[in-house]
């Protein structure tokens, strides 16, 4: 470990790109703990002569994930329902393989997560964009567009990218629709651990009485994206088909990484790390908002949020967010435009400002750079 550090320290670190969204604070991850657990698992593997593993996932990890989801996300599941995937993206693909055929209508939040949309489109699905208002996914408007949808994709805890929470009445309405229409709901619970006020909101899956919800969790936000591990909780009657499809699709996720994650969760490091990151991310969010208020007042409207890993910097009416995003890129800032996540024209443009992987100094420098692009834009 010392030797690896020495080699790394002699190289210049790669600076984080200010405001890239969805990345964890990797510099604050307890990497020494992770490396120790990984080493331990290599010796364990050698002693036990490991070969291939179970397609649905390494059993201790499925147990650890089920316990965690029950306790912290109010997900109702047993370990057999947990399929270990290579991140949320992989879960979208598995669901597509099982549930979609060409021309199947899929209801999707608009604006929404483009990579999920593309995964479903790759199976020939027809995407029906659905309006998102202050209560989240608006099912009534969706049903006026499609009467025979088989799948609805939602981010109920923290809508991506707008950040609203789906109300209880909308959740119940969506579950009722899925039951009636014999359809499926994909609950993408990508960043719900980062709630700064009150307790994290319970999952939609936890109030589903009819086995219509696929719950997706990812370790990209709570640990780091390069790990490529996530989970998919399926209804009990679909365990076998998903395990079979998982086997055909890459066989299983790397065993050492799964075993390391299981130990990381079981030995308490995971919840401790989340607690520390919650505090850090909240501080970073506050710094971002106060810097924007100082240097970008009247140009970008950013409000504190009680959850998530990014904020939307709303632009003035008539300002083209794609153009501003390109200008930001030209000064080394990655601030995606709201339009790039939208099917329909947005009524007001915005920049998506991630703050979790950007430290205090970088946030301050980043806001200064953003201010420069507004001076040259004169809007
Ligand atoms: C809405 C949403 N879902 C899921 C993910 C995570 O994807 P993955 O687990 O494939 O890294 C992200 C990451 O940016 C996201 O924004």
Image (tube, rainbow, N blue to C red):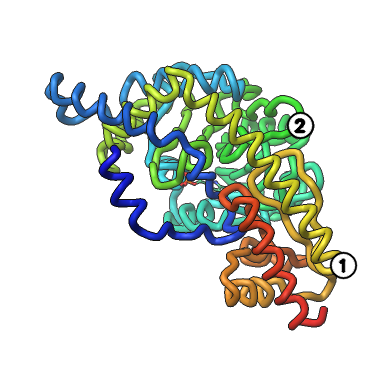
Residue in the picture at 29% in, 51% down: 7
Note whether 64 is above or below 204 in the view shown.
above
Left or right: residue 136 versus residue 59 is right
Q: Residue 348 bears which disc, if any?
A: none
Say whether residue 365 is left or right of residue 13. Answer: right
Which corner quadrant of the image does residue 111 belong to?
A: bottom right
Residue at (79%, 49%) from the top-left corner? Answer: 133
Marks 1 and 2, the one that precedes in the sequence: 2
Q: Secondary structure at mark 2?
A: loop
Any part of residue 347 in sight: no
Query: Which label was assigned to residue 197?
Result: 2
Is residue 83 or residue 360 the one in the foreground? Answer: 360
| Residue placed under numbered mark 1 in the picture | 298
Task: Pick the residue in front: 185 or 340.
Answer: 340
Image quadrant containing the N terminus: top left
Q: Is residue 304 visible?
A: yes
Q: Residue at x 28, y 44 (%)?
A: 4
Most extreme residue toward the right, as rendered? Answer: 298
> Residue, x 40% and y 36% (percent of image)?
31
Image coords of residue 132 (percent x, y): 74, 50
């Amino acid at each position: 470990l010392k030797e690896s550090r020495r080699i790394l320290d002699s190289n210049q670190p790669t600076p984080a790109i200010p405001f890239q969204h969805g990345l964890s604070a990797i510099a604050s991850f307890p990497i020494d703990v992770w490396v120790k657990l990984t080493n331990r698992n290599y010796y364990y593997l050698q002693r036990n002569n490991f070969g291939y593993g179970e397609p649905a996932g390494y059993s201790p990890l499925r147990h650890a994930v089920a316990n965690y989801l029950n306790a912290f996300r109010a997900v109702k599941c047993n370990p057999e329902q947990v399929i270990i995937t290579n991140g949320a993206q992989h879960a979208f693909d598995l669901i597509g393989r099982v549930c979609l055929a060409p021309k199947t209508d899929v209801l999707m939040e608009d604006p929404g997560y483009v990579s999920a949309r593309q995964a479903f489109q790759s199976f020939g699905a027809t995407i029906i964009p659905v309006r998102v208002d202050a209560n989240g996914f608006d099912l009534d408007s969706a049903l006026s567009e499609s009467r025979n949808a088989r799948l609805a994709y939602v981010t109920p805890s923290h809508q991506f990218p707008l950040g609203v929470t789906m109300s209880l009445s909308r959740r119940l309405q969506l579950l009722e629709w899925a039951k009636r229409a014999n359809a499926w709901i994909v609950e993408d619970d990508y960043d719900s651990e980062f709630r700064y006020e009150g307790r994290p909101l319970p999952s939609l899956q936890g109030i589903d009485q009819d086995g219509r919800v696929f719950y997706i969790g990812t370790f990209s936000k709570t640990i780091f994206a390069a790990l490529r591990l996530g989970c998919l909780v399926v209804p009990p009657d679909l365990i076998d088909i998903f395990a079979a499809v998982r086997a055909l699709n890459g066989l299983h996720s790397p065993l050492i990484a799964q075993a390391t994650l299981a130990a990381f969760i079981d030995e308490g490091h995971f919840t401790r790390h989340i607690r520390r990151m919650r505090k850090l991310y909240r501080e970073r969010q506050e710094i971002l908002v106060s810097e924007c208020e100082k240097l970008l007042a009247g140009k970008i409207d950013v409000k504190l949020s009680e959850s998530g890993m990014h904020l939307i910097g709303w632009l003035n009416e008539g300002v083209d967010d794609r153009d501003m995003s390109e200008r930001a890129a030209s000064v080394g800032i990655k601030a995606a435009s709201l339009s790039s996540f939208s099917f329909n024209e947005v009524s007001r443009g915005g920049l998506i400002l991630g703050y979790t992987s950007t430290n205090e100094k970088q946030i301050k420098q980043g806001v200064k750079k953003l201010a420069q692009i507004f001076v040259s834009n004169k809007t």
